[in-house]
Structure formats: C-alpha cells, structure tokens
Amino acid sequence: MNDDSPASQRHPLILIDGSSWLFRAYHALPPLSNSKGQPTGAIYGMGNMLRRLLKDYAPEEIAVIFDAPGDNFRHQLYAEYKANRDETPEDLKAQYEPIREMIQAMGLPLLAVPEVEADDVIGTLAKQADARGQSVLIVTGDKDMAQLVNERVHLLDTMKNVRMDRAGVIEKFGVPPERIVDYLALMGDSVDNIPGIDGVGPKTAAKWLQQYGSLDEVVAHAEEVKGKIGEKLRAGLHILPLSRQLATIHCEVELPVALDSLRPAPQDKPRLLTLFRHLELQRWTQELEGQLPPAEDSPAPAANSSAPAETAAAPAEPPPRLETQALAVLDWAGFDAMLAQLQAAELVCVDTETDSLDSNQANLVGIAFAIEAGKGWYIPVAHDYLGAPAQLPRAEVLARLKPLLQDPNKPKLGQHIKYDLNVFARHGVQVAGIAHDTMLQSYVLDAAGNRHDMDTLALKYLNHTTIPFEAVAGKGKNQLSFNQVAIDKATEYSAEDADITLRLHQTLYPRLREIEALQRVYETIEMPLVPVLAKIEQTGVKIDVPLLGRISLELAERMQALQQEAFTQAGTEFNLGSPKQLGAILYEQLKLPVLGKTPKGEPSTAEDVLEELAAQHPLPRLILDWRAMQKLRSTYTEQLPAAVNPHTGRIHTSYHQAVAATGRLSSSDPNLQNIPVRNAEGRRIRQAFVAEPGNQLLAIDYSQIELRLMAHFSGDARLQTAFHEGRDIHQATAAEVFGLPLEAVGGEQRRAAKAINFGLIYGMSAFGLARQLGIARGEAQDYIERFFGRYPGVKQFMDGTRAQAREAGYVETLFGRRLYLPNIRSKNQALRQYAERTAINAPLQGTAADLIKLSMIDLHGFLQARAPKLRMIMQVHDELVFEGPAEHLAAMAAELAGRMVRIAKLSVPLVADFGLGSQWDAAHSGSGHASSG
C-alpha cells in the first residue's frame, strides 16, 4: 500500500513551547503533592496537556522546547533583559527535572539550546519546515510567537482551544504577523523588561502601524504625532532599535538536531512506571500496568479548584481490533481457487506491494486481493531475502491475472488506486474497470476533515488501528524494502490492507450515495480522472538537459557579474556566500546601520535585513539578486535533470487529487506547478520542457477563469457585460472604479483594479490592498467601496454566500463539490472571518478545479478515439499541455481548445488561449483563442 502522501500532506510539525506551557500548567492547578511532600501539580498539568495533544493530533514530527538555563544573547544586548521577573517558585523548580524525565520517557524529542531562547529554536524549526512545504503548529500562549505566523505556520493555544492563523493575528493585535515585532517594540514588554515608548499600549501601537505601515515609518513621521503621546514617542525614539532587536525571534539558530529527527519514539514504559510510582500518580501507573485503559485526559482544573489531581473522565474501552484471515498464495492450486472466487465476485479490491514509492520505477513484489470483509489473499512474487520460500513466478501470475485486471466490466476497488495502475502498467498490465477508491470517497465526503490515507480512515471510520509499515519492515536506516520482508509478515500486512480497504468502501460509499451531489462529483469527476492522471504520469514530459545545463551556466555567469559589481561596490573582494565576510563589509567597512542581529549577537545579513538596507546602498540589492540566481540553480537547473527517469528519459511527476480542500490538483517529485513564470529566468526554465523530435507541444490555458466564475455566480450585470463584450476586465474595472473612459485608464489604475479583482476573490482586506498598492488604508477602503458600488451583484453574492454558509455549514461548487466550514459560526472572530473568506473563494476555485478536471476527462477520451498519437502530458493550474506530431497537433489545437470552453455552460463566455511550439514557453505564449460565446 502506498498512500497519497506528498510533503504538503504530512501531519503538521508540532512545536511545543515547553517553558510557556510549564508556567501555565503550574498556575492552572492548586498546589498538589505526593505523600512525601514532593510537588506534582505542574507535572500532572503538563502531562495531561501532552497526553491530550498526542491523542488529538497523533503527531509524526514533534518537539518540546525549553529555555536553556543561564543568560542568552539578548542579555548581551541589554543587561536588564528580563530583570523584572520574579524568582521562580521553589516548588516549580523542584518539578523541572521530573517533567523533563517524563517527556523523554514518553519518547518526545526535547530541546534546550544554550545562549538562545526557546522562541528562537522554535522559530528556526518552523522556518525550516515551512521552507520544505510542511505546515507547523506552535503550541504556545506567548504573543511574541505571532511574528512567526504565515500561510503554513499557525499558533495553537490548547488551554483556550484556539488556533491562530494570519487572520487571527490581525484580528487579535490589529497588525499582521510581519508587524508584530514593530508592535512589541513600540509597546515594550514589562514581563521581559523590553523598553518601549512610555504610555504606548496595544491600541496606540496598532493605530500607528495601521496609519503609517511600519515602525520605520512611525519614526519617520514622529513629528506629526500630536499631544503628550507624540512627545513621549519623540523622547523614546532612541530606544526603538534596541526594543526591536530584543523582540525579534531569530530563525537561523544552529541546532544540535536535524528537522527530520524530530519523530516520537516508543515510550519507555519501565522508565515511566518508575517515575509515576515515585510521584504517586496512581491512575497513570495503573494505565501503564494494564489495570486501567487510557483515560480521556480532561483539561487541568482551574486554580484554587478543590478537584483532586487524580480525578479524570470515565475511561473509554480500547477499540477492538478487526481480524483479517490472511491467506498466502504460494502454489497454483491456491491461486486457481482464489482466481475462481475473484472472477465470481461483484467487486474486487486490489493492492500492490513494491520496492519503491516511485510507481514509475517500482518493481512488483506482491499483490493482495479482497472480495469479502474479514479475508484477504496475498500473492508474493519477488521476495528475495535469504531463505525465502519458493513463490509463483511474477510473469506467469500477471499473465493469468491479466484478463481479470484488464476487464472493463469487472469493477475494481483500491486505496489510492492510481499508484497500483502505474505499477501494473509498468509490468505490462493496463488495468480497466476502475470503479472505486476509498481515498477519494473520503476526500469527496469531507476534503478538509482529515487526512485520507488508509491508516487515518481505518481509525476514524472503523475504529481500527492498522499494522504499521514499521512493524513489518523496521524503520530508519535499517528499514527493509518490501522484497526483504518475511512472507508471513508481508501476508498479514498486505491482506489486512486489502481487507480494510474493502471495509472502508462498505462504510464510505453508502454515505456518499446519501448525498446525490457528492455522489455525482465522485462518480463523474474524481473517479474518471484517476486513469487520466495515471496515463499522464506514465507518459511524463521530456526536458532538455543540455539546455538546463546552459541555463545553469548563464545563471552562474550572471552570478559572476553580480559578484564583480558587488566587489566594486564593496571596494574589495569577499565571499558573497559568507555571512561573516558580508557582515564585515556592510557594517564595519560601509558603516551601514545594524537593523538585526543573529542569536550569537552578530549583525544579521538575513534577507529581510538586506531588503531594508537596499534603500541605503546598492550592495545589499546585489547580494539579494545573487542569492536569487543561486536558488534558481539549486532548485531547478540542477535538480530537474536529477529527476529524469533513467528508463524513459522523461520526468514523471505525481499528481495528487486528495490534498487541496478546494479540489485543485497538486503535484510533487518534482512539483511542476511551482515553476516560476513571471520573470525571465522562470520562463527560461520553461524553455527546457521540450517535445520529442518531430513533435510539438500545445498549451491551452483558461483565461481569467475565477473572475469569469465570479461574474457567473454573482450575476452582476456590469461584470457580465464586460466579459460578453470581450473587454480587458482589469481595464474595465479601473474605468468603473475610477470613473474614467476605457481609453483613459492608465497603468497605475489598471494595476490597482487588478489587485482589487483578484484580492476580493481571496478575501483581501483594505489593509492588505493598501500594503500591496503602497497606499493609505483609507484610500484602499475607498477603492473597495467604489468597486462594490459599481458591481453591486458581487457584494450581494459575497454577503449571500456568507449567510448561506452559516446556515448550511458548507459551500458548494457549480457541480456540487462541498467544502465544510466548521468555524463559520465560531465565536472566535478570527476563525469565523477566515471561514467566511474561504466560503467566498472556495466555490470559485473549486469550480475552476472541476472545470479543468472535466476537460481532462473529456479530452483524454476524445484523443483516444480521434487522435491516439496525441498525448496529454501536464496539468498546471488552469493549463493543459499536450504533445504529438507537429501536423496532427496543429490540426487538432483549435478543436481541443474549443472542447475545453464548451465543457460547461456559464452565463459569461469561457475563454481559452492556446499556442504551439517546440518547447513549453513558446507554446504557453501562443496567440490562439477559443471562446464559448
């Protein structure tokens, strides 16, 4: 079984601010102790919170981070840092070591890095995870952490059960995450003894930052601030740089561990038993001894509560294991008996076992089948460990199974069955009759409700914990590939996979059939798309490796030119990749202001610092450009050639249907949907995606699809007229908003209108629009109000969608795909507003996703019937790319684009631009045009 698990679908990395949690646990409970007088309240509170977190999130990657004892680099910057803090209570100090002992015995990674704070360690780990596309939950109640929040990094306050994203930060503090440091610098912090401006509180700090945009701009306009508070601001200007340094979390700390090592280990039961017995934590001791099942850990009692520490919710019974009769098929008699039952079955569940997660290079090791709950077969065909028993030959097994597998009238079921299709195709079997996929059933039922891998689904819907892969293959550097797994273990594991997949289908599919719209999405969009995506993945795309090599050299030459110019600006030669040498040039030689420091107290050369310094000297901009060229080389021109399949000479990405909640496809290994297209270097990289000799590429791209869908959903007459008349929609919006004739619209007005058009789709506020356009917030608000005044149907649609979402709890695409919004009625304003923005965007983005998927299904069938020499080779957002003989492709281009715009009937024309070329950039830049109106 190989689940659909790209990096973006990992469980979030959970980073627990141990120091924050410890103090909160200590103050949340009344003084508790054992019979020896040893304090246990913080231990019990911290343990309860950890147990609840582990139960609720089942983290795959986690760490608990504490402040290291002693001073850190901030004390070097400011000797009075944290000088106001009270001495740690002795009864809390006495619990430090038992808490650390408990955490480590629970198998949780624990970090305390000298000379830096827990915040800096958390910031560094969060930045590393974010860089690899992984989401992060920082478990804390510390407001300073809000500066780390972005699209992937959220804060989680488990005591208040509040999760804070970017919208939540803005809602709570009045400023976005990137301005939290400025906010803290203005206010100061009495707890940490960070000096700020006397008399400035949260409201004043937020007001100034909303008005002026940043701390630097507040300083620049200090003379404009009236009254006594203005006098205090001007009197305290000298302290602001230090306050900002002290408030800034440093995200480039040298850590003693790698991010990938932060995985929970099995708990050390003997060690925990010894600790719990010593502390006299009776319930936890009895649970470990098996006398009691695990309790549902309740939140810690409030301070001064008389509730005893050992009181807990009534224990729940452990889930019963579902038994699977696992049958190994090792001879032809057993095979023939199995095959007869498969041929007579109404539905066949199939699952492959291989030696690789890459389906286009994986070798088939075994095949599992199930046709009734509680029973599964496993046919080992390539287990080759020393002493492995004789197995049926793979080639003959496949030959005998081929009629069944290739029969379109014999329905097949799988979990992420696209992987299995690719594996079988690589071994000469083109599986047909793909009827069901439990991963997609779960995804269509509730896309954002949970992960859709089999283990998660089995636990959620069957209350069953599956055999983990590590239990049969080991883990870490000693993990076996499946061909090395003992056949008895492989049989138990694989037969269970097939059996549980069948049971999941018997549970999930009836639920789908209860909701006609969801059944239709599943049966007419998601399932028919599976073989289409499998074929695209099998086909792959050719890249011009020598050209990528030349582009890499060109980038190197540009880097060299940038380096020479940097030498000129610096007046000396130095290593541009060395922060230490660069820092010496910037701060010692050029005397530029120190705007930030590293955790070790050195002046920072981080990107955000260089961006600020670039306004004062040419050298920082040269460094930033040099780093950008270096990133393009390392990410694309050097990595794409390494992704070429040695057997096919092409790149084979993996497309994922069950990742994005809105229905959009994503891709990985490599991610072809993230290749930059808005700059010359990105377009140059697209030029390396080429056709085979004698072939060409055809690119067809839906034009402004989400804006057209806004016109359709809203029914706004002016917006629809603009599309019917074929106007430049951004120019048309500018004319409406600014009250100008079309011909009088200038570049700045069109740019503002474009920001409004797309910003409204994604829920942009006046604050966000102001930042994007570099204008005052009031001016941005005026733009938005004028937009709604000219397009009242859009405002009515947005208000109506929010109201419908609150009533129904979900929104739908044009084709019935649902996105459930559990926070749409939340009392937490930030969570509710985020859900409301999602309610407006999801029907648009989800319908666009449905349209491109329906087009893929339609064009795949059309090409098979009418033009089998043409192949669909890529899907990138709203674009499809085809390859085929030049004359055939040219003859079919307009027809294919025409079918795409006729795939659905909207109240405005659907438009697709298309072009042909020997490489992707040329095709993408083509001038062909198809319209449904």
Image (cartoon, rainbow, N blue to C red):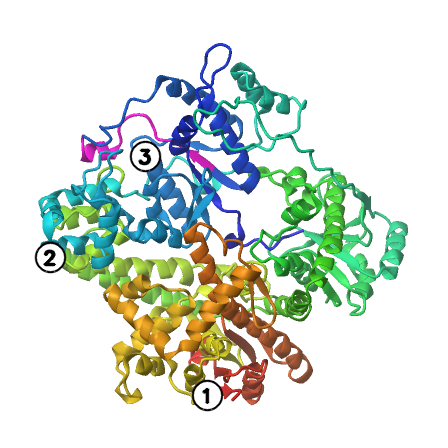
Label 1 residue SS: helix
In the image, residue 63 lies at what x, y percent?
Answer: 46, 36
Closer-to-camera residue (797/494): 797
Image: 773 above or below 212: below
- Write down the region rendered in magenta: 63-79
Residue under label 1, please give it. Answer: 724
Q: Which mark is residue 433?
A: none
- Magenta-colored stretch includes residue 324: no
Residue depicted at x 29% and y 31%: 115
Q: Position of residue 376 (x, y in %)?
A: 80, 48
**In terms of sequence position, does the residue under pointer 3 or pointer 1 come before the other?**
3
Q: Which residue is mark 3?
A: 117
Q: Residues within 10 Å of mark 1 (few under 14, many from 20)?
A: some
Q: Where is residue 112, by image quadrant?
A: top left
Question: Do labels 3 and 1 touch, CB within 8 Å?
Answer: no
Q: Amino acid at mark 2?
A: Glu
- For marks 3 and 2, the one nearer the N-term is 3
Question: Which mark lies nearer to you, 3 or 1?
Answer: 1
- Vertical side of 497 occupied by 671: above or below: below
Q: Position of residue 759 (x, y in %)?
A: 38, 68
Horizontally, residue 513 falls left or right of residue 538, namely right
